[in-house]
Image (tube, rainbow, N blue to C red):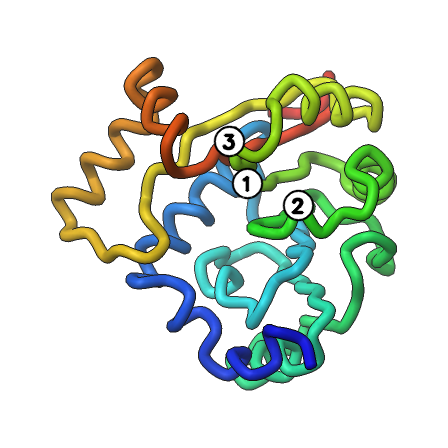
Amino acid sequence: MSKYEGVAHNWTESEYADPAPYLAHRARLVVALGPRLVAGDSVLDLACGDGGLADFLPGLHYRGVDTTPQMVEAAHRRGHGDVVLGDLNDYEPPEPVAATLCFRAIYYARDRRAFFQHVRAYTTKKLVFDLNPRQYRLDDVQRDLRAAGFDRAVLRPFLLPQKTALAAPLRRLAIALERSGPPARLLLRFRFTYLCAAFAAGTNR
């Protein structure tokens, strides 16, 4: 049995101490980081879980993909009917998408460079994913992105904790710190992740 089968029914609520502000902030960066998404753009969310992020992307055409049937069923119960069963390594959408998203799942890529190349083939604006700099060397990841045709990348520290709920003033402070340069990078040595938007040179921004 997959480790996700038994937790799919309340995945978003159990994985995030305060889901709404966390996912809302992630969604804002999905839209704004790198080439901006606009109303009507399509997004493909790989390893989407129960599709909780879809609630925070109004105006965009959302499709999710997950390998666990129970997650797909949970997404449908949440009202996200356009979530389908599939593996991020080989799933291909029926038509190109503006943005491909991959959160907390990049390590599922069997071959990272091949995964980036696969995504590049059907993504017109950008790939957005999170990256733990204590787990992966940024230079190595950026080299693989360039080899796949994503020759531009914008990195943004993401400093909201997943498992701790912050009061509103502390949330605002954490988000402000994301733009602080050296202090944010210092925090990333010990905790938190980058959000990365990768795109091809010449993509509209």
Location of mark 3 (residue): 134
Location of mark 2 (residue): 106
Q: Where is the C terminus found, in terms of image quarters? A: top right
Location of mark 1 (residue): 130
- 168 lies left or right of 9: left
What x and y, as percent, mark residue 194?
48, 33
Q: Is residue 194 above or below residue 54?
A: above
The amino acid pointed to by label 1 is Asp
Q: Where is the N terminus found, in terms of image quarters? A: bottom right
- 12 lies left or right of 81: left
The residue that appears at 76% across and 72% down in the rendered structure is 85
Residue 190 or 79: which is nearer the viewer?
190
- 85 lies left or right of 133: right
What x and y, as percent, mark residue 25?
38, 46
What x and y, as percent, mark residue 128?
61, 39
State the SS at label 2.
helix
The residue that appears at 61% across and 62% down in the rendered structure is 48
Say which quarter of the image contains residue 138. Answer: top right
Rounded to the nearest angstrom, the CA distance separating label 1 from label 3 is 12 Å
What x and y, as percent, mark residue 174?
25, 36
Front: mark 3 or 2: 3
Rounded to the nearest angstrom, the CA distance separating label 2 from label 1 is 8 Å
The amino acid pointed to by label 3 is Arg
State the SS at label 3.
loop
Q: Earlier in the sequence, mark 2 or mark 1?
A: 2
Q: Is the residue marked by circle 2 packed among few (<14), some (14-19), or many (20+) residues within 10 Å?
A: many
The amino acid pointed to by label 2 is Ile
Q: Is residue 116 above or below residue 34?
A: below
Q: Is the residue marked by circle 3 packed among few (<14), some (14-19), or many (20+) residues within 10 Å?
A: few
